Amino acid sequence: MISITFVHIKKLGPPSLQHYFYTHFITSSQHSSLSLSVPFSYYQEMAEAILFGPARKMIENLGSQTFQEIGSLWGVKDELEKIKNTVSTVQAVLQDAAEQQSHNHQVKDWLQKLNDAVYDADDLLSEFSTEATRRSMVSGNKVTKEVRTFFSKSNQLAFRGKMSRKIKAMRQKLNAIAEDKSKFNLKVDNVETNVMSRKRETHSFVRGEVVIGRDEDKKNIIDLLFDSNVQENISVIPIVGIGGLGKTTLAQYVYNDEKVQKYFELKMWACISDVFDLKVIIENIIASISGNTPVGNLVIDRLQSQLREKIDKKKYLLVLDDLWNENPENWRELKSLLMGGSKGSKIIITSRIRKVAEITRTVSPYFLEGLSKEQSWVLFRQVAFRNGQEANNPKLVTIGREIVNMCQGVPLAIKSIGNVLYFKEKESEWSFVKDNIKANVTQEGEILPILKLSYDNLPSHLKSCFAYCSLFSKDYEMDKKTVIQLWIAQGFVQSSIKNQQLEDVGDDYFKDLLWRSFFEEVTNAYGILKYKMHDLIHDLAKSIAGEECRLVSFDGKNINEKNHDVSCPSYIDSSFRETLSLLVKAVKVRTFLLTYDDKESGALEESMLNTIILSFKSLRALDLHALKITSIPNSIGNLIHIKYLDLSFNVKIETLPNSITTLLNLQVLKLYVCKGLKELPKKFGELVNLKHLYNDGCDNLSHMRCGLGQMTSLQTLQLFIVSTSSQTGGLGELKELNNLRGTLEISHLEEANSESIVVNLREKQHLEKLILKWHHQDQVDNNEEEKLLEDLQPHQNLKYFEVHQYKGVKLSSWVSSLVNLVDLSIKNCKRCRYLPPLSHLPSLKSLRLDTLNDLEYISNNDMSKEVPASSTTLSTPFFPSLKSLTIIECPNLKGWWGRTGRDLVATTSASTPDHQQNQSHNSLPLFPLLSSLRIINCPKMTSMPLFPNLEESLYLKNVSSKPLQETMSMSFSVPSSSSSLSSSSPLSKLNNMHLDSIEDIESLPAEWALYSLEELRIWNCPKLTSMSGAMRYLTSLCVLSIRKCEEFDPLRDMHDDGMEWRCLICLRHLCFRGIPKLKSLPVGLQCISTLKQLAIENCPNLMTLPELTSLEDFSIERCEPNLTSLLEISCLTSLRLLDIGDFPNLITFPESIRNPISLETLTLYDCPNLTTLPDDGFLKSLQKLQIGYCPRLAEKYKNKIDKDFPNLEIEWNWC
């Protein structure tokens, strides 16, 4: 039999398409297992999702004391109460109405009317409260007293009467709509989570041969199962991923593995699904053990006793599949019944919800990813093609690969669509399916209903937040704070807890969606954490949102009057005028976003900007970033509801209109990189509801306005500029701003005066990062500077602290009290000689000292006082968390301590071997976690603490090698003549090393044991002669660059012409520059199949190249007089790119070049006397020719070559 669920198929297209789906998909009797579930019109559920936010906000606002007081004085208290009751009644049936509308057009029409009415009511109440706020500001007193004063004035009666009539009319409209709900017998939903239970059952068996692309995942999970190095008797391993990704299949694959079967005495499988019923779960586990469900309707006490008896002292494996429970108490109750197994027992949990993994896990969750393109193709090919069909029809393969790419590596989507195509043999049929998928990617297979189950289980407040995110285009990298601020602007985020910041509530919302796998974490190109939605999740959001939220198409033709939130994902230019003419139809728009990635778009004309402002008076969020706007019109003051305004990256804006200060609901104002902005409006302090002012990068901002201190709601103030002018706000404006969080930069501190005492930074407990900047002339009073810094002490919760151009001699002692400090950076403090003790700071991970000209020692204490002789057993370790240390441009820095403490060697036991007593590391402490060390231009520094645990990088430039030698003396094992070094060598885990201008380094000794090194650069080391000792250990090296080392010879101390270089089995990139003793490359390079790039520059004695058959990219510069012999490149059979440059004496193109068949690009530059190019046959085989700074070539060939070789891509640069 064929299982068919066929509902509301009209969304799939015209009648012909319906007929196609019915006749071709559903009647495929050959596929008896095919179950096609065509989804509901999910977009219609947006009413329930989006309406919930404004409805709940209205209910809470109408119930507030402020509204009740104003309503009473305005004579509309009863009307407001009735509106509240009506909205509450309607809200209670939204869920049922959303479900009924798919098959009941009357309910659908009713919801649309309700939708419009609620938005209108929200606008009216916003206008009501805004006017009350405005009048309260006039008197400066609280609302109640001000309103009494206001209503005693006769000239206000007209406005009162107008608002009263509007509210009454709105109440009547809502009442009429609410009364209609009785026609539909809608059910009241009292369950906040609105869970729609859709029971799913799974089993434990899967054939290994049908599982595609999960071998590595299987191995990883099995490794976790067999890991005996765990503290708990019972370990829990969560597998997390979106619906349809194959979590259950992976669990089955592991469960049925032969080694797993032998390893565990007992194996059990239970599918939990979305309802967590402890009794049912126990019954299922028992049934999995015995093969039978417990007989009779046993009470739970009897059941739990049976379960504990069956697993007692057995090493078991239990799979709890499809777990949704987010209640920690439920999990603890179940887990307590499972603790009787023997040590080594494991529980695998599969879940879509990250929060479930966090509640249950004892090891890190295993986040399952989609299949690769090739794995996806293998799975699709297995499902969609019959034997031989693939080979016989290559066009189907091409179409199939396009379809597979749309499935985003999700196995369930691939299998669903593959099943549909199995009996289709014609290319036209496959193309039709492909085009249909592209148009309605969320409508075909089973993937959307499965993903939608996750959506159905969301609480209503998260449904609205999720659906709203459909405004961001696919693959858009979302900023979490921005998304939360937009949610707040729309009224989706509410809190019933007094004084709880909505941003904190919104953060919980966001984490909840992340844990449920609706969002994914991604790190962008700048290393910043962002978030995105999987393409199929985005399709779901778009389906739910429907017409409420709309990404504007390039031509704007997908816009209509029902759209409330719109975003423009495309570049905006002059052609946007036509789009805007269509967009203005959506007069109720509440969101206008720009979601393209670039920081620069085309210019938005002033007339178009005015049209946006005047057309969309209901706007809550307006994004105008990077539109080359030069001025903001006064009409911006008409947007009385606006809460979020982004003007960032409009670098020519010099001032903001005064009307912007009338936007009393404004909470977020973004002015990032408005470089031309000179000042804020005079009455800027009247924006009493402003929470976030982003003004980082406003380089021309000269001062802050008076009155800023009354904006006590401010949470974000990125830049505060100190000015001495009496017309501007001084440091004292910061005194009451104790809600500040995130980053605060205080600039031009040289302008500060005695009022800095009342800055009150110590009360700003939410501040995470503080940047203090001075901009000095030479004449400075050091004492005043130090006193000012002392008065700027922050709260000890501070995590990041930077000081720039401070001219004091001593850094304040309070820095030592910042126990939560993670990152400390001191830059351009040229007179600073004394730093406070830092080694005890428990959280400090990064320390940067940059351009401290007068600093001689980092610590003023004697080392014996700061670090006792028994430093290895300190209760507070030396820099216990420090991972990154950077010291730059400290020309007088001599060492870490004024006295190095070498006298501590005398405390060593008399029984200590002599060779150890002579090693300075016995007296020096070590950094226990330091992973990255950079010391640049500190030529006098000869001693510092030891750094034996470097992993990330070591960069030493213009510094003595003694600190490095002291650390290397710690090597705990001495190699024999033939044995390898112990991995305990201090640099054995190091990945990247750069040595530059180290005068006293002569070689890389074998003792360094650079097993893990991937990149090595040695530049400007005049005494370096050889690398022979280290060569055998460089088995992980990928990049090697040696520059300007006059004494270096790669063959020195080697036999067989450098065959030892074959040990560099991972080498990809090799560069020799300025190596006069280089006569020939080591022949061992011929054995390295990974070598792809070779660059040789200024090596005048190099004669020949070996046969490097894997080389793809060869660059040679300034290697006369042996150029001809060096360019015998016929042996470079894989060469694709050849660069020849900086040969002033080269006149004719070398005939020695035999064009390799593989060569694609030839680059010639800085050859001023070159007059010939290769022959025509050579040029015809090329794809690209680049010529730069070759004037004679340009004169002879520039016009001719373009005509003769039309298929050759040619670039002439500076010719």
Image (tube, rainbow, N blue to C red):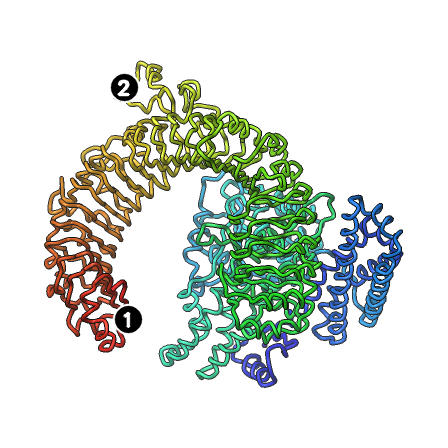
Q: How many marks?
A: 2
Look at mark 2 in the image and give the residue it sits on: 913
Question: In the drawing, does residue 1143 fall left or right of residue 13?
Answer: left
Residue in the image at 57% along x and 72% along y: 577
Percent coordinates x, y for residue 774 in the rendering: 49, 36
Crowd tier of the residue under label 1, counting other residues whose Cα lies within 10 Å: few below 14, some 14–19, many 20 or above: few
For residue 871, above or below residue 522: above
Image quarter where the C terminus lies is: bottom left
Q: Nearer the viewer, residue 322 or 944?
A: 944
SS assignment at label 2: loop
Helix or strand or loop: what does disc 1 sit on? strand
In the rendered image, residue 977, in percent from the top left (x then y), is placed at: 18, 34
Q: Please, what is the three-letter code of the amino acid marked with disc 1?
A: Glu
Residue under the image location 71 percent in, 68 percent down: 99
Q: Which residue is mark 1?
A: 1209
Res 760 → quadrant? top right
Q: Is 26 placed left or right of 165 in the picture?
A: left
Q: Is residue 261 left or right of residue 919?
A: right
Residue kind at label 2, given as amino acid type = Pro
- Residue 1045: percent from left, percent from top: 20, 41
